[in-house]
Image (tube, grey):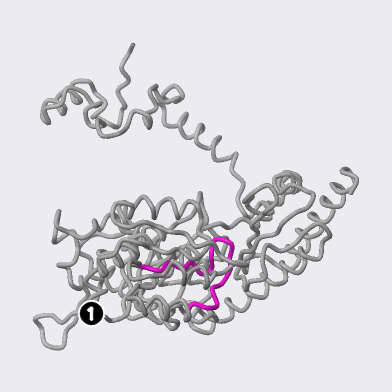
Amino acid sequence: MTTFVHPYIPNTAPESRAAMLAAVGAESVEEFYADVPESLRLQRALDLPTPLVAEQDLARHVRGILATNRSTEERLSFLGAGTYNHYVPAVVDEVIRRSEFLTAYAGEPYEDHGRFQALFEYQSLMAELLAMDVVNVPTYDGYQATATGLAMAGRLTGRGRVLALSDVLPEKLSKVHDYIRTSLAIEQVAPADGTADLDAFREQLDDGVAAVWIETPSATGAVETRLAEIAEAAHAVGAIVVVGTDPIGYGVLTPPSMQGADIVTGDIQSLGLHQWFGGAHAGFIAVHDDERFVMEMPSRLFGLESTDVPGEYGFGDVAYERTSFAQREEGKEWVGTAAALWGIATGVYLSLMGPAGMAELGELLLARTRHAQQKLAAIPGVELGDTALHLREFTVRFAPARAADVVTALRAQGIEPGVVLDERTLLVCVTEATSAADIDRLADAVSAFVSDDSKEHGA
């Protein structure tokens, strides 16, 4: 078998690979994967095409792959489930593509005071939106941010249980569980009619609970309207209230911090970041100005600092000694790769929108969501999944039609009607980019399919 040596990657040369293995005392590359269970290994070579050495051939191959994609500008999309089609003002992209911001790694060189100021402004704008005092430089994504918020609660209380009161995206629940499973056990309390079941919650609440975890809006878009009651009960037994949220609605909704939340986490994808191929994602963690909570935050914080020159100020790390950069292996959590460039994008977005713009957007999202619910619920054979207040997303149930069949039929018409949750349930998402005419088109297409399906099955 001929060994392929990549023209731009010298480490693929056999002699280079052998030299590196000798330097670290390994017999083969396989030794580096000794900790990976056999069940997770592919056990075969990757199914890759023949290497394309010529750049023009590679470019043509990649263009062919990209040509199979369909964007939300080409198709009418009601897809959400964690990545949302919100409008991104052109100036956001213009700013983050500037050379002083755009870099190959993490969007963040380690000594760049202009970038530090831009991220300080982002933190300040997010703090105002969330009515919180301290917000971190963005983490990798919102899943990690929520996992870190729960881990913080575990360290602060010394307890080992988490009560999850809301519907959580399965992918998020999996990521959070994987992150905290060695120290915290998640106990799910099934929601009632979309939001937290307070009676079941109180039955399971005791002084062994480290954190009460609420997602609002939940995975199905339900807004938790009794957060203050939940927080009061949690605090009575010394538990910490951790809220996972999307900040898009807080121009009109009451922020969790004003309802008793101790740690607020989430993702900023909806604030000036595109969907792209699964989204540009970045996580935030927000806490009150309480030293106990601030010192448990593992991620970087940028603040305004005085210099040696009287009256002159700069921007830099705050309480750097908290982080694994300073603590190394003694750190409470590994800082990891930040998504700082997305923080700058969100900072530009929030500064453009301002309080009035965010309030208008929140009102529009609530109105569009309700309009879509009413249009679909008016169709015979379609009903809403619950009666809770919803922001942007909601579920509908079909009878006798199957949700997957609805998706297949409407996809043929250029409509992505939503995400299938089970045989009869579809998760539908609307944003400010979804017009009333778009919603009418969806409703008409669903109505036509359900009617034809009912006739076919003799209903």
- The one of 350 and 334 positioned closer to us in this rendering: 334
Horizontal side of 135 relative to 188 (left or right) equals left
Q: Residue at x 40, y 77 (%)?
A: 261
Residue found farthest to the left: 308
- The one of 425 and 344 positioned closer to us in this rendering: 425
Q: Considering the numbered disc 1 on the image, is that residue within a helix, a strand or a loop?
A: strand
Q: Quadrant of residue 417?
A: bottom right
Horizontal side of 228 relative to 37 (left or right) equals right
Q: Quadrant of residue 436?
A: bottom right
- The one of 52 and 345 positioned closer to us in this rendering: 345
Q: Which residues are magenta?
A: 211-227
Q: Is residue 271 in view from this perspective?
A: no
Q: Position of residue 42 (x, y in %)?
A: 39, 27
Asked if residue 226 lies in the magenta stretch, the reply is: yes
Q: Can you say whether 438 is above or below 36 in the image?
A: below
Q: Residue at x 72, y 67 (%)?
A: 373
Q: Position of residue 351 (x, y in %)?
A: 44, 77
Which amino acid lies under the numbered mark 1 shown in the image of this protein? Leu
Q: Residue at x 45, y 77 (%)?
A: 256
Image quadrant containing the N terminus: top left
What residue is pinned by disc 1?
304
Q: Alpha-carbon neighbours of circle 1 within 10 Å: few (<14), some, or many (≥20)?
A: some
Q: Position of residue 24 (x, y in %)?
A: 12, 31
Q: Position of residue 342 (x, y in %)?
A: 39, 62
Horizontal side of 21 relative to 209 (left or right) equals left
Q: Residue at x 50, y 51 (%)?
A: 278
